[in-house]
Image (tube, rainbow, N blue to C red):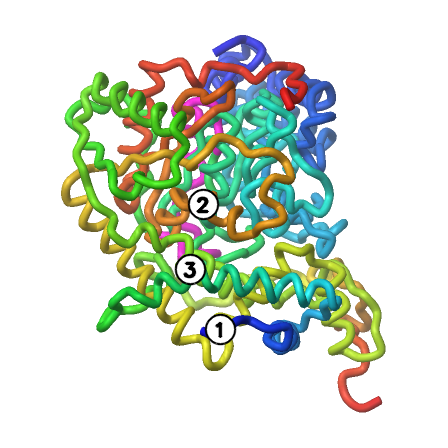
């Protein structure tokens, strides 16, 4: 693997919707590089034909598919930074 | 058990027998928090009024002739990422400063239904990401055995609350060792149940395929009592398992005789402190005296567990933490447009370790790297699980130290994340495999507690607890109390 650069961190930070300072970008690039170098050890393992394990649940448990009460709208909105007319209010999405 | 720190079993007995009241017990523990928490900083919120109201309800029910709950009047501390309706839940993050959830976690509701009294919410590494509780956005929690040292993490506040008698029991969560490691470093018992044993409803998610709620206490008996109360299927969590929950405390009487304890010696060859290793060997001898037989097992892929864990856990975290976007709850930093608001809110709301893990997790999931890292890690996860399946054909439990070293100094590992991650080498395998783990007080190295860890077959917490109880019948490590005034020894 090529070393992780500040540009890599920039790209990933954009994907993750994180605005980082210049100092954070440099620190994270160096640390990410260290951690990935350590993680290289798993590249050497033979995983041919090994099923990937995405979770450890024995099996999912489903409830009856019947309507039941859910969180009242007021309670769901109570912790919102901004709400109006029963809706979450956000800054402009499109255009300027 | 000294009278200043009665355990959960003893408190519930006294309250049920009306020798004392839930209110009196609650007041004693609230007083103790007021007296002891300054300088230790285990609690983020003390829920005094709510606790006293709850205690009075328990007393009134008993006075009215109701059958006492198994945890009647037992004071419990709750890690600050389990929701309690109307009580601030911060996850140790500025992102959730002042957030009051509109629902209560199933594990907390079940403890309260059993008569337990929640005395407060405990400090933690932000969003449970850390092994020292230094990553809290609010304060640093200190180890009661030496205040210059960390209590472990991420459930550090919960471990300190129990080890100092500010609560008889606590709830934590364990994604890569966050119950067992602080329990070990604070000299108490911590149980990570099997994945699916305890509902995750109302628990703020870190890595959904690894997270599990569990109890911390000073004795195996206390932990068994709490585990019985919180385990079991919950239709609000599709991953909670429909598996019968035994009476764990009743199961303890069966003892440890005839059980085989597997030790992965080759996995323990490198990097373990000599004092920790000596304590571990003594524990095996003590267990043999209780009737167990020690056998050798191998876990060939366990050395890859930390690398695997930090890929899987950060990938899941990067996805789970996408919900903190300044829209529905928590912090919002105003900006001209939506994208700007997301970016500024998340930059200001998250601390360094959380950002680091979001970056790492997003990277391993990103185009071009997914197969080499995330998919590969999921395959190695399968290999690690198979290692345990193989080991459990030769033994009922696998034993190893909980941590490679006793508690490290505050600030010692914060500049080097990889060194901090390596601290988790013995705890992450259980989360990857989805199996239960129990950490027991296993003695002291230079005055600092160290932990002995037992790992079990899926849904066989009972055997871990049986062996743990037999061990505590023969040892006195769990009866040691941290000094009331533990100034740093430097």
Which disc number belongs to residue B365? Answer: 1
- Tell whether B399 sits left or right of A2: left
Q: What's the distance in space between the residues labelled 1 and 2, CA to CA?
A: 23 Å
Disc nearest the viewer among 3 and 2 = 2
- Find residue B248 and report its horizontal and vertical position in percent: 33, 31
Would you say residue B97 is visible in this rendering?
yes
Q: Which residue is mark 3?
A: B238
Would you say residue B85 is visible in this rendering?
no
Residue B230 painted magenta: yes
For this rendering, which residue is in front, B126 or B294?
A: B294
Q: Earlier in the sequence, mark 1 or mark 2?
A: 1
Residue B261, quarter of picture: top left
- Tell whether B215 sits left or right of B101: left
Identify the residue at the far front of this view.
A3
Other residues around mark 2 within 10 Å, as few (<14) / some (14–19) / many (≥20): many
Q: Earlier in the sequence, mark 1 or mark 3?
A: 3
Say which residue appears at 45% left-offset and 22% top-offset.
Answer: B445
Figure check: A37 above or below A87: above
- Find residue B56 and report its horizontal and vertical position in percent: 66, 24
Regarding mark 2 in the picture, which secondary structure is present there?
loop
Which disc number belongs to residue B424? Answer: 2
Regarding mark 3 in the picture, which secondary structure is present there?
loop
Q: What residue range appears in magenta? A: B216-241
Q: What's the distance in space between the residues labelled 3 and 2, CA to CA?
A: 28 Å
Regarding mark 1 in the picture, which secondary structure is present there?
helix
Residue B238 painted magenta: yes
């Amino acid at each position: 693997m090529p070393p992780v650069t500040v540009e890599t961190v920039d790209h990933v930070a954009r994907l993750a919707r994180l605005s980082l300072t210049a100092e954070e970008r440099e620190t994270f690039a160096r640390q990410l590089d260290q951690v990935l170098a350590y993680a290289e050890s798993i590249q050497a393992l033979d995983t041919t034909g090994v099923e990937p394990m995405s979770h450890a649940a024995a099996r999912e448990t489903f409830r009856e598919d019947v309507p039941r009460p859910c969180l009242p709208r007021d309670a769901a909105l109570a912790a919102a930074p901004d709400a109006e007319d029963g809706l979450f209010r956000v800054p402009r999405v499109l255009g300027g | 058990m000294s009278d200043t720190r009665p355990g959960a079993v003893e408190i519930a007995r006294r309250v049920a027998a009306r020798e004392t009241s839930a209110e009196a017990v609650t007041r004693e523990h609230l007083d103790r928090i007021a007296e002891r928490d300054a300088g230790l900083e285990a609690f983020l919120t003390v829920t005094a009024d709510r606790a006293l109201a709850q205690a009075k309800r328990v007393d009134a029910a008993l006075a009215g002739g109701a059958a006492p709950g198994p945890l009647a009047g037992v004071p419990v501390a709750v890690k600050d990422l389990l929701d309690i309706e109307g009580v601030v839940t911060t996850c140790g993050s500025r992102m959730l400063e002042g957030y009051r959830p509109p629902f209560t976690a199933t594990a907390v509701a079940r403890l309260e239904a059993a008569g337990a009294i929640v005395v407060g919410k405990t400090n933690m590494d932000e969003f449970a990401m850390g092994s020292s509780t230094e990553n809290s956005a609010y304060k640093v929690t200190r180890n009661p055995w030496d205040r210059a040292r960390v209590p472990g993490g991420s459930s550090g506040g919960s471990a300190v609350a129990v080890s100092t008698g500010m609560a008889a029991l606590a709830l934590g969560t364990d994604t890569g060792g966050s119950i067992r490691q602080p329990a070990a470093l604070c000299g108490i018992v911590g149980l990570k149940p099997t994945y699916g044993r305890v509902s995750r409803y109302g628990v703020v998610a870190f890595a959904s395929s690894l997270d599990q709620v569990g109890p911390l206490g000073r004795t195996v008996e206390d932990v068994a009592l709490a585990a019985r109360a919180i385990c079991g299927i919950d239709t609000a969590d599709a991953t909670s398992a429909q598996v019968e929950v035994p009476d764990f405390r009743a199961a303890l009487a069966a003892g440890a005789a005839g059980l085989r304890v597997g030790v992965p010696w080759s996995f323990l060859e490198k990097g373990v402190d000599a004092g920790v290793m000596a304590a571990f060997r003594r524990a095996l001898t003590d267990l043999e005296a209780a009737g167990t037989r020690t056998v050798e097992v191998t876990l060939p892929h366990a050395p890859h567990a930390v690398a695997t864990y930090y890929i899987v856990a950060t990938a899941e975290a990067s996805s789970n933490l996408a919900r903190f976007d300044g829209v529905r709850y928590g912090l919002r930093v105003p900006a001209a447009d939506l994208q700007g608001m997301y970016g500024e809110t998340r930059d200001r709301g998250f601390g360094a370790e959380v950002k680091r893990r979001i970056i790492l997790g997003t990277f391993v999931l990103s185009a071009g790297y997914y197969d080499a890292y995330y998919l590969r890690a999921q395959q190695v996860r399968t290999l690690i699980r198979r290692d345990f399946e193989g080991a459990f054909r030769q033994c009922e439990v696998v034993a190893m130290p909980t941590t490679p070293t006793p508690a490290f100094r505050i600030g010692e590992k914060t500049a080097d994340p990889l060194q901090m991650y390596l601290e988790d080498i013995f705890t992450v395998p259980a989360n990857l495999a989805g199996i239960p783990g129990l950490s027991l007080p296993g003695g002291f190295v230079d005055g600092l507690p160290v932990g002995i860890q037992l790992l079990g077959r899926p849904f066989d917490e009972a055997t871990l607890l049986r062996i743990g109880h037999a061990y505590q019948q023969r040892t006195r490590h769990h009866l040691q109390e941290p000094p009331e005034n533990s100034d740093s020894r430097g």
